Amino acid sequence: MEQFDGLTPAQMVDRVSTQLGCPPTSAQVAEYLDKQDPLRPLRREFHLPRVFELPTSDLSVADGSADCIYLVGNSLGLQPRLAQHYLKEELDKWAKTGVHGHTEGSRPWAWAENNIEQMMADLVGAKLEEVALMNGLTVNLHLLLLSFYKPTATRHKILLEAKAFPSDHYAVESQIRLRGLNPEESMLLVSPRPETLRTEDILDMIEKEGQSIAVVMFSGVQYYTGQLFNMAAITEAGHKKGCYVGFDCAHAAGNAVLQLHDWDVDFACWCSYKYINSGAGGLAGAFIHEKHRDTIKPALTGWWGHDLKTRFQMNNVMELQPGVSGFRLSNQPILLVCPLQASLEIFHKVGMAALRKKSVLLTGYLEYLILHYYSQDPSQPQKPYVIIITPTDPQQRGCQLSLCFSLPIRRVFQELEKRGVACDMREPSVLRVAPVPLYNSFTDVHRFIETLGAALKASCS
Ligand SMILES: *Cc1c(COP(=O)(O)O)cnc(C)c1O
């Protein structure tokens, strides 16, 4: 898509429509953009459900044989085709060799996760030694906080977003209680104005309260608004005040370009089933910056934190691996490693930079069409309109747009589902729509906009 370098998505759409001699809203524009898209073949590496396969579709209003319009990779990524193949290899190995599978084959179970950690490290901008694949996201957040949150009488607070994802909120709350402290005093929340958080508000809060903050704990991309935080600036501000700074990258990993090492982030965790397509409950990630490798120790230990070379001597004298590797507790679930490997290999092949480049155009195209059809028009007060909560600046968002409608959204959402759209609704009036550059096309975005028109019409009748 080099011909569009330096253009905003809106300029790109206008240029293509002029070139083709069709309106900017024409499906031809989307088809043209898909033809120019060098990443288009990646779609075939995933299982894309067809409309009739979705339990919510209604074949009296939709063509069942069409691909569904899958815009919910922010919640659960699609299945990479190779996942089943890799799983079958390990199930066969188990069937045929039993316990020998621990050390045999291309994916010896006893260190299977180590084979894919480099690819994960690349994806989040970390060094190999800084990343561990293990557990679930909330578990990793707890393990990290157990070591990084060391409250003292004067420095006892954890700073986080007022509307953090519930699991993060609960994790922080319970960590504070675990230390015998009161969340009302030790949990410091920054509120959005009105929908998204301003970087200056976050930095001001750190500047003002920094002396009493032990840990600054933010999401990388906010799950509800899609806002991408300036992680480098937040980290720097936190460090200036002597705080540890950690990020939950659940909605950022595989979505935004991350540089956890270079940004000097102290710790991070993320799940792999959203943009990283590893399947529900997939193996999660944890990051600890290498500068802490000899100083930050796990509060809880298990045999998987023991040095691999002597782990199986079973002499009960711990030789703890340095850094995040020492935080490993249990042997790895090989059945979770398989689908994650299938997905990471695709990321490895394309690289985040190319994905991000397409993502900016794809989401910009969605924004263009939403603004075109659903900007508020004072001369037509009855007409439904949409306010995009997500920041307009591509530097401050990933692929997701959060659309706030001027009417209750439940009926519209149901009509969308009948027509083969998979996206996410937050009542009363927000749709979260995430075109994922790995497998979504410009045509998906165009079909979504057309279907949204039909759904609004059907739900208002
Ligand atoms: C998805 C998500 C979670 C989910 O946590 P699990 O432990 O994987 O169930 C937690 N926090 C954030 C910010 C999320 O986006």
Image (cartoon, grey):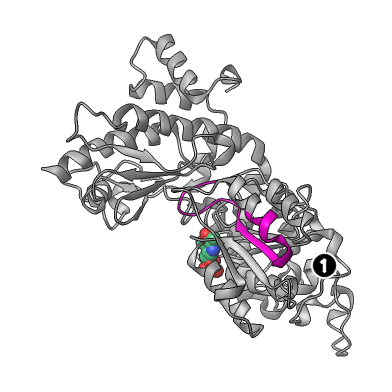
Question: Which residue is situated farthest in the bottom direction here?
Answer: 316
Q: Position of residue 79 (x, y in %)?
A: 50, 54
Q: Is residue 292 left or right of residue 147?
A: right
Q: Position of residue 26 (x, y in %)?
A: 33, 21
Q: Is residue 202 left or right of residue 417?
A: right
Quarter residue 372 falls in: top left
Q: Secondary structure at mark 1?
A: helix
Q: Position of residue 244 (x, y in %)?
A: 74, 63
Is residue 319 at least partly visible in the picture? yes
| Front-lying residue, 186 or 287 | 186
- Does residue 138 lie above or below 34 as drawn? below
Q: Is residue 157 left or right of residue 382?
A: right
Q: Position of residue 186 (x, y in %)?
A: 62, 73
The residue segment tinted magenta is 205-228
Residue plotted at (24% across, 54% down): 410
Residue, disc 1: 323
| Front-lying residue, 231 or 70 | 231
Is 387 magenta? The answer is: no
Is 219 magenta? The answer is: yes
Is residue 91 at least partly visible in the picture? no
Residue plotted at (36% across, 9% down): 21
Query: Alpha-carbon neighbours of circle 1 within 10 Å: few (<14), some, or many (≥20)?
Result: many
Quarter residue 174 falls in: bottom right
Residue plotted at (73% across, 78% down): 153
Viewport quadrant of the N terminus: top right
Question: Which residue is situated farthest in the front direction here?
Answer: 208
Mark 1 CB within 8 Å of ligand 1: no
